[in-house]
Amino acid sequence: MPRKYIDFWINIVEDIDLSEIMARIRELGFSSIAVSIIDESKLEEIERIGRDFEINVYRKIVLEPDDKSTLLRELRTCRGRYEVVSVICRNLEVALTAARDNRVDTLIIPPDKRFRIDRGVAAIIKNCIEIPFKWFLDKSVRRDFLRVTDEIVEHLARKVDLIISSSASKISELRTPYEMISLLHIFGFNKESALDSVSTTPLKIIESNLVKLSSSYICRGVVKLD
C-alpha cells in the first residue's frame, strides 16, 4: 500500500495565492497538510481550496510562550479548536511543561534554544519532536539548527518519534517528502524510518485527535458507539 504523505506545518503569515500553493503541495506528492495561519478567518477558504485539489487540510496552532503559566493558559483556550497543537520551546521551563502535557502533540526546539538536551531532559520528554526543514534552508541559522538536530537525534530519537515538516510560508520553501527526509539521512536514519516522519507518524496524531474532537469521544479510552 503506497504511503500517504503529510506536510505537518504550512505556516501562512501573509497574503499568498492559496490555489497556487495548494497546487504545488499536490504536485510535490502530499495528500494532507496541517496549516497555521495568522488570519484564521481564512481557514474555511483554505479547507475549501484543499478539497478542490484533493488535499486534506487540518488546523494547527503553534504556541510560542515565554513561560509555564503562559503556556498553560494558551493550552486551555486552544485544544478543542485545532487538530494539531505544537509548542516552540526556547527555554527549559516551557520544554518541560509542554513535555508533561498531553494536550501538546509536538515539541519544536528552535536553533536559538536556551537549554541543553541531555539525559535528564530526555527522560521527561515523551512527545513527538517536530523538526522544521525551513531552518535547514536558512543559512543564517543552519549551523545552530544542525547542532540542535544532532542533540535531538542523540538523546531522543530512540525514545520518541520524529516528524519533519516544511514550516513553509511561501512556495519556494516547499520541498518533496524525499527532500525533507534527506535531513534524517544525514544522521543515519534508513529510508523507511525516515519516511515515517512525513507519513505514518504525523498521520497517527491526526487520526487520534480527530477521534478526541468528535462528538463520540467521552474520555481517554472511551468512545460512544452509535
Image: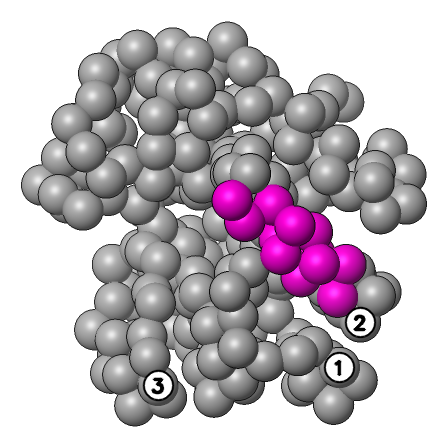
Quarter of image, res 79: bottom left
Q: Residues within 10 Å of mark 1 (few under 14, many from 20)?
A: few
Q: Which of pointers 1 and 3 lies earlier in the amino acid sequence?
A: 3
Which amino acid, by three-letter code, is at mark 3? Asp
The CA distance from mark 1 to mark 3 is 20 Å
- Residue holding disc 1: 118
Which amino acid, by three-letter code, is at mark 2? His
The CA distance from mark 2 to mark 1 is 7 Å
**Where is residue 176 shown, x and y percent of the image?**
60, 21
Asked whether 118 falls inside the magenta stretch, the response is no
- For the point 35% across and 26% down, the residue is 170
Labels 2 and 1 touching (C-beta < 8 A): yes
Q: Is residue 79 visible?
A: yes
In front here: 31 or 38? Answer: 38
Q: Secondary structure at mark 3?
A: loop
In front here: 225 or 84? Answer: 84
**Where is residue 52 shown, x and y percent of the image?**
30, 12
Which stretch appears magenta? Answer: 140-151
- Residue holding disc 2: 155
Residue pushed farthest front? 140
Asked whether 149 falls inside the magenta stretch, the response is yes
Q: Secondary structure at mark 2?
A: helix
